[in-house]
Image (spheres, helix red, strand yellow):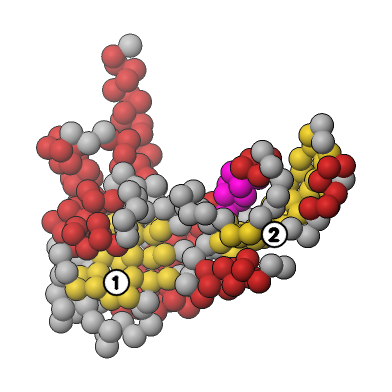
Amino acid sequence: MNQQVLQAIVASIDNRESVALISVTEADGAFAGNVGHHAALWLDATRAPVGDLALGELTEQIYTDARRALDDRKHRRLDYTTTEGSLKIFVEVQAQPPHLIIVGAGHIAVPLAAVAKLNDFEVTVLDDRPLYANVARFPSADRVIAGPFRAELSQLRGGKPTFDNHTYVVLVTRGHQYDIDSLLEVLDDPLAYIGMIGSQRRIRAVFELLEKDQGIPAAKFDRIYAPIGIDIGARTPAEIAICIMAEMINVMRKGPALSMSEQIRRERIARRERAQEKTL
């Protein structure tokens, strides 16, 4: 393998960046001499790949297909046939760990950060109180941020327009007004998961208020896991952290468990369907 490609792959792994190694494994015809060519590729299409597949016009199509594999976080075999010959490509994906952002550094956040790290999540904890948001309180977290919730969430994007679909956000601040403000910041992002703590009655009231006062379409709230977690009868902060972690794993692995938020979600969808029927 080209030393430059190898160094790019190693650097990306060290920096916890998702990267794909593209390898030409079989080829014939005009492509026969390309076996063994490699390239390193990232999701950011503005970032130039490292290495050269030397496959002419077909190269950009391979890069597009490889980025899809990287976005799906799955290795992939790609086959191409042209009038010049055929070839087989293997895309080896080195995916960054899923990123959990815990908004609120209270009593639930402490065990949640620890158990998320045990499950190989990258963990960020955010609170506007330095007394709570500090490394001594969250020794296992990758970063701990003290600052205004919404402004720091925006800053965390790192110049990107949105968080990606491997980012998980848990809203467990000290007051529902902070949860709502943070929710409004991330609601349109293509997140893997948004969870918000609160009772069923409180969650219903919050969603209805935001629909009325903010003009937010009701369907946008269907993706929010609130009340947060899977019902295991949790009582203590550590037990609640486990039920939240279980829900995130269930979402990530497409598991069969039903979330506590499912009842509200079904009620809201049914209510919209009844309203639509009345207008017909």
Q: In this view, does 219 lie above or below 261?
A: above
Q: In which quarter of the image is residue 116?
A: bottom left
SS for callout 1: strand
Residue lying furthest right: 29
Instruction: Residue 22: give x, y in percent of width and height.
Output: 67, 56
The label on residue 38 is 2
- Of residues 188 and 177, the one nearer the viewer is 188
- Of residues 180 and 204, the one nearer the viewer is 180
SS for callout 2: strand
Quadrant that contains the C terminus: top left
* Callout 1 touching callout 2 (CB < 8 Å): no
Q: Which residue is drawn at 19% across and 53% down?
A: 180
Tell me the magenta residue range. 62-70
Residue lying furthest top: 280
Instruction: Residue 112: give x, y in percent of width and height.
Output: 36, 73
Q: Residue at x 34, y 17 (%)?
A: 277
Amino acid type, residue under disc 1 in the picture: Val
Tell me if residue 197 can be seen: no
Q: Is residue 229 above or below residue 64?
A: below
In the rendered image, residue 174 lying in the magenta stretch gets the answer: no
Closer to the observer: label 1 or label 2? 2
In the rendered image, residue 64 lying in the magenta stretch gets the answer: yes
Is disc 2 surrounded by few (<14), some (14 to 19) or many (20+) residues within 10 Å? many
Task: Provide the major secondary structure of the magenta segment.
Answer: helix
Amino acid type, residue under disc 2 in the picture: His
Tell me if residue 220 can be seen: yes
Instruction: Residue 127: give x, y in percent of width and height.
Output: 20, 70
User: In this image, 180 relative to 62: left or right?
Assistant: left
Residue lying furthest bottom: 136
Mark 1 lies on residue: 125
Q: Which of marks 1 and 2 is nearer the N terminus?
A: 2
User: In this image, 147 relative to 159: left or right?
Assistant: left
